[in-house]
Amino acid sequence: MRSVDRSTLERAAESRFRSAYDYAVFEYLRGAKIHGTLERAGVRIGGRLLDCGCGGGGVTVSFAGETQWALGLDPAGGFQEAGIRLAREKKTENVRFVRGDGVRLPFPDALFNVVLSHSVIEHVSSATGYLSECRRVLRPGGALYLSTAPCLSLAGAHLPRLIAPVPLHILLGRRAAFRIFCFLGRHAAWLLREGKEANTFICLSERNVKKRDDLLQRVTVARLDRWIEETGFRRLSSELHVTGFFRRALPGPLRRRLMRRPWIQDVMIGQIQYVLERP
């Protein structure tokens, strides 16, 4: 199993929005955590790999050394600057990138051994359409790594954090919270925990770019499980990671008891990691 250099990863996270390349480097380092999740699920990494929603392409490059070839797909094309440069620096030749829509993948059936989907499903127009396409392009017995966060999560939903831990999106709803964070990013960034190079609400406002809420799917654990069942995947492993706040604040027995209540569970979880198999 690859080792995760946590201190290096934390430093990269603090500057990940400095540029598309900095974000790709952060993704490259984070690839070791995804690799570990797949190995714990018993998945043999090899053959052909698709990083579906690859962003800057760092994760794609990080897996290329263990695959026949790795392909990154993303609609925005951030990899054109970042992923290609990173692959060249790492002397990785079996990587390709393409622009495309995850709900309409431009690939034939059963092409890939492994598909990666990291923090993507909450941004697609159709969750079941996206999962169905991931299933279609996987060979039988192939594995899908799927990670996301509940929309009510204290650490999820792609919203920044206040210095005072007040969950605005839970108290006021996402739309109001998003508008408040846009205002704070422009006029009172000192109230936010993350600095501008780790916070798009700040860095985009400084560039005079309007921040758009690209969260299209309101993920809950129950809803995600239903989507998976509807699209015919078999679950190999599931990891529900509780945020640090609840790990520190609640004793283990109480934490486990609260995790059995669906809406409280959604608030407590910072990340969902599933490994799924196409039967």
Image: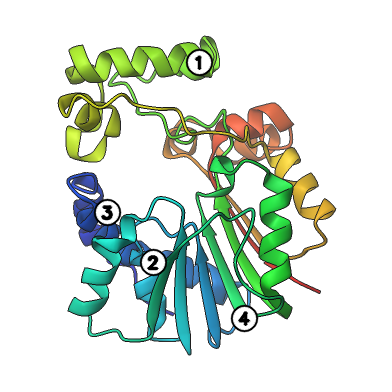
- 176 or 100, which lies in front? 100
Q: Which residue is mark 3?
A: 23
Position in image of residue 273 (x %, y %): 58, 55
Q: Quadrant of residue 31?
A: bottom left
Any mark on residue 113, and which? 4
Q: Earlier in the sequence, mark 4 or mark 1?
A: 4
198 horizontally vs 220: left or right: left
* Residue linked to disc 2: 59
Label 2 to label 4: alpha-carbon separation: 16 Å
Residue for point 82% across, 54% down: 229
Instruction: Name the residue that disc number 1 marks.
Output: 175
Which residue corresponds to the image point at 31% horizontal and 86% vertical from the top-left?
93
Q: From mark 1 to mark 3, how far is it between C-alphas? A: 26 Å
Q: Quadrant of the N terminus?
A: bottom left
SS of the residue under disc 4: strand
Q: Secondary structure at mark 2?
A: helix
Query: Amino acid type of disc 4?
Result: Asn
What is the crowding at mark 4: few (fewer than 14 residues within 10 Å), some, or many (at least 20)?
A: many
Front residue of this view, candidates 133 and 239: 133
How far, Cα to Cα, is label 3 from label 4? 26 Å
Give the SS element for disc 1: helix
133 left or right of 46?
Answer: right
Can residue 123 be spotted in the picture? yes
Of marks 3 and 4, which one's residue comes earlier in the chain?
A: 3
